[in-house]
Amino acid sequence: MIKQYQNERIKRIAQNVLSLPALPTIIAKMVELIDDPRTSASRLTKLISTDQVLTAKILKLANSAFYGFPRRIATVNLAIVVLGFDTIKDLGLSVSIIGRFKKRSSDSSFDMSRFWEHSIACGVTAKMLARRLNYRISGEAFVAGLLHDIGKLILNQYFPKEFSAIMERIRTKDESFRQAEIYVLGLDHPVIGKWLVERWNLPAQLVEVIEYHHSPEEAPVNPQLAAIIQFADFLCKYCRIGYSGDNILPELSEPTLPLLNLKYTNDHIDFRYYAEAVALEMEKAETFVNLIQGKSARVRVYM
């Protein structure tokens, strides 16, 4: 009887996720164009110029002090040249997805602003790690980091009773979010997140990393990207950037650590070294991060 009840609940979650709206047409088309190596800046400009909000944000970012361009950038085409396709994709997806989940949390102990702070920091950190590893597409790591916990928002906004039960177990049992949701639901946020990004028709490598970011050794195609996201998540919690539902550091997957080529000191991962790298990266990305979140406050990094 209990198993049947759990299966019905899982089925209900799946049906609700699959009935959610797809990404806006312009964002889905933008991702498709940027992922096509034949796409030109002028072709991308024509698409982006049809969306006034996205156009304004791209121009604001291109004209920010961070890029220090000597003259004002007044056209989307020039902004794309200055920023690059990867940054345009990161910005467009981030603004669109965060805009879709702007509701207040169903649980008072879950701060939506701090959740996005953590998610964006994971994206920035993952992109930094990917560059250091010469990973083929560092922008792919940013989007994966941004979306790795998206399944938690589905639970928060569409299953408030279950979400409150999860948060109560975290408070009273000192469990991780994943432990609590498996107890309450019989499944976890990576699976729910996978259903959502499949619904959005995002690339298969992003679907895989969201499903396996807590168990990168099980990723059948690209365990390295999943390992990058797991370590980025770990570092952002280690540095106490934002809040993703609990304060428990995720357990790192031993089999995939060699894929990260990490710096060791006295036979231990040099977390202090990486914390300083994260702080520097967040400082460099401050303009981008604040533009996504629509605020001017600095993200705080603790070491």
Image (cartoon, helix red, strand yellow):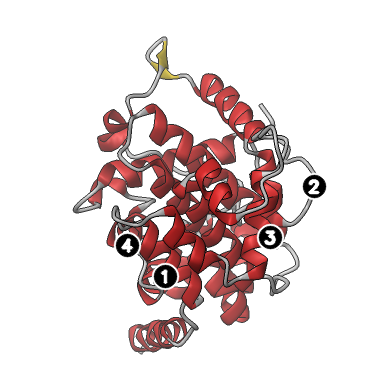
Q: Which residue is mark 1?
A: 29
Whole-angstrom CA distance, mark 4 to mark 3, is: 27 Å
Question: Residue 300: x percent and y percent?
Answer: 73, 37
Of residue 133 and residue 248, the one placed in the foreground of this image is 133
Would you place residue 142 above or below residue 45 in this image?
Answer: above
Question: Residue 33: x percent and y percent?
Answer: 37, 62
Q: Earlier in the sequence, mark 4 or mark 3?
A: 3
Q: Which residue is mark 3?
A: 56
Q: Which residue is mark 4?
A: 203
Between marks 4 and 3 in the image, the one whose residue lies nearer the viewer? 3
Marks counted in the figure total 4
The residue at the point 40 percent across, 27 percent down is 132
- Inspect the image, locate mark 3, and give the three-letter code of the amino acid beneath it: Ala
Q: Quadrant of the C terminus?
A: top right
- Inspect the image, locate mark 4, and give the three-letter code of the amino acid beneath it: Pro
Q: Which residue is mark 2?
A: 296
The residue at the point 35 percent across, 84 percent down is 7
Q: Earlier in the sequence, mark 3 or mark 1?
A: 1
- Residue 11's quadrant in the figure? bottom left
Judged from this view, the residue extending furthest toward the top is 266
